[in-house]
Amino acid sequence: MNSASNTMRAAEFDGYGPASVMQVRVVPRPAPAPGEALVRVHASTVNPIDTIVRSGVLKWRTGKVFPKRIGIDFAGEIVDAGSDPRGLKPGDRVWGVMPLELEKGEGQGSAADYVTISTSRLAKSPAALDFVQAAALSSVGAVAIIALVDKARLQAGERLLVRGGAGGVGSAAIQLGRQLGAHVTALGSGKDLDFLRELGADTALDYRTTDPNTLPPFDVILDLAGTDLGAYRRRLGPQGRMYCLAVKSLGALLYFQFSKIYGSKRVTFFSAAPLGPTMAALADLVDQGAVRAIVDSVYPLEDIALAQASVEAGGGRGKRVLAHTGA
Ligand SMILES: NC(=O)c1ccc[n+]([C@@H]2O[C@H](COP(=O)([O-])OP(=O)(O)OC[C@H]3O[C@@H](n4cnc5c(N)ncnc54)[C@H](OP(=O)(O)O)[C@@H]3O)[C@@H](O)[C@H]2O)c1
């Protein structure tokens, strides 16, 4: 890609299907509107939502407009920030999360060499992280902050359960839970139990062999699995709160509504949309040494289909990252 040209590479797909529908094409480079920055993306990641959208499971919502772009998070460098009131300027290393515009076929994705994005969604990325590491932590770290700090208001001494501890969000949530002074229990694959303890879990359990009915009560449950919601809800203590980020079925959506009406313990689903202050708070946590990036593997942007297939196969630790520039 020629940095002086008006074109760039972007990952797109022309119809729903398996990972092999992904294409990397040369497309026009976007131009920033007032209030937006043009960011040169050096790395992005594959998130489960990308594979869910691409598969067509959500086509009732994502519609029939093609081609569609893909990718929500990125680490990169400001090319043009206009007259940003917060002082972001060309050359600044930033990270951010794109607005999730599922319905828009013409919406941008971060799996592209450039994105335009409101400067309110950006913050400077930590100096200690390279672009691959920054991308790996960007959205999952921000989601962990929104879940445990903003929503759950997790307190020191409380008991936290993270279901899906070795994945992207889970690996960040374990570290953050530990930093907040919680007693952290993590559920993950049997092969990952040592890894979960290294991240800061006080107790690590194999999700395939653990009966939820044998678990102690928890103050906060962060559910990244989206199954057996009733059984885990029953593990909530008197002040317990449960947040489920993975919607695996229409039944789960109905269950969230049901839990608002019946019983004292609510199961809350939310869709995280991190803005600049959350990205800045995440950078502070990295600077303090409280949270680190977990990179499972790195793929060139052209191999996005392989990276998506790897996410769909499961069994990873942390994030599959797309390196756009070899950085
Ligand atoms: N609502 C939102 O705003 C939001 C934001 C971010 C993510 N999410 C959703 O949250 C979920 C997790 O995201 P992620 O990025 O962390 O995904 P991920 O990196 O794929 O991690 C998922 C983890 O869950 C583990 N797992 C699978 N089944 C499990 C079970 N029954 N019990 C415990 N752990 C289990 C997997 O282990 P193995 O692979 O070893 O089986 C994997 O480590 C996804 O569904 C994603 O779409 C939602």
Image (cartoon, rainbow, N blue to C red):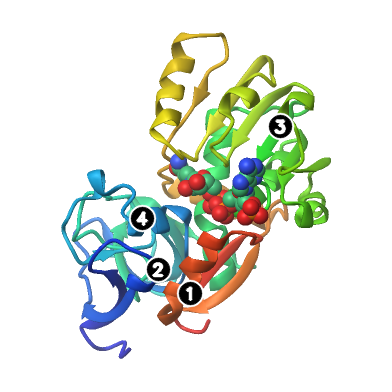
Cβ of disc 4 within 8 Å of ligand 1? Answer: no
Mark 2: amino acid: Ala
| Above/below status of 3 relative to 180 | below
Q: Which residue is mark 2?
A: 19
Q: Which residue is mark 1?
A: 306
Q: What is the C-alpha distance between the residues marked 1 and 4?
A: 22 Å
Mark 1: amino acid: Leu
Q: Position of residue 288 (x, y in %)?
A: 70, 53
Q: Position of residue 70 (x, y in %)?
A: 34, 63
Q: What is the C-alpha distance between the residues marked 1 and 2?
A: 7 Å
Tell me which numbered mark, 1 or 2, is placed earlier along the sequence: 2
Mark 4: amino acid: Met
- CB within 8 Å, label 2 to label 3: no
* Left or right placement of residue 104 versus residue 192 in this view: left
- CB within 8 Å, label 1 to label 2: yes
Q: Nearer the viewer, mark 4 or mark 2?
A: 2
- CB within 8 Å, label 1 to label 3: no
Tell me which numbered mark, 1 or 3, is placed earlier along the sequence: 3
| Above/below status of 167 relative to 219 | below
Badge 1: few (under 14), some or many (20 or more) residues near its Cα, within 10 Å?
some
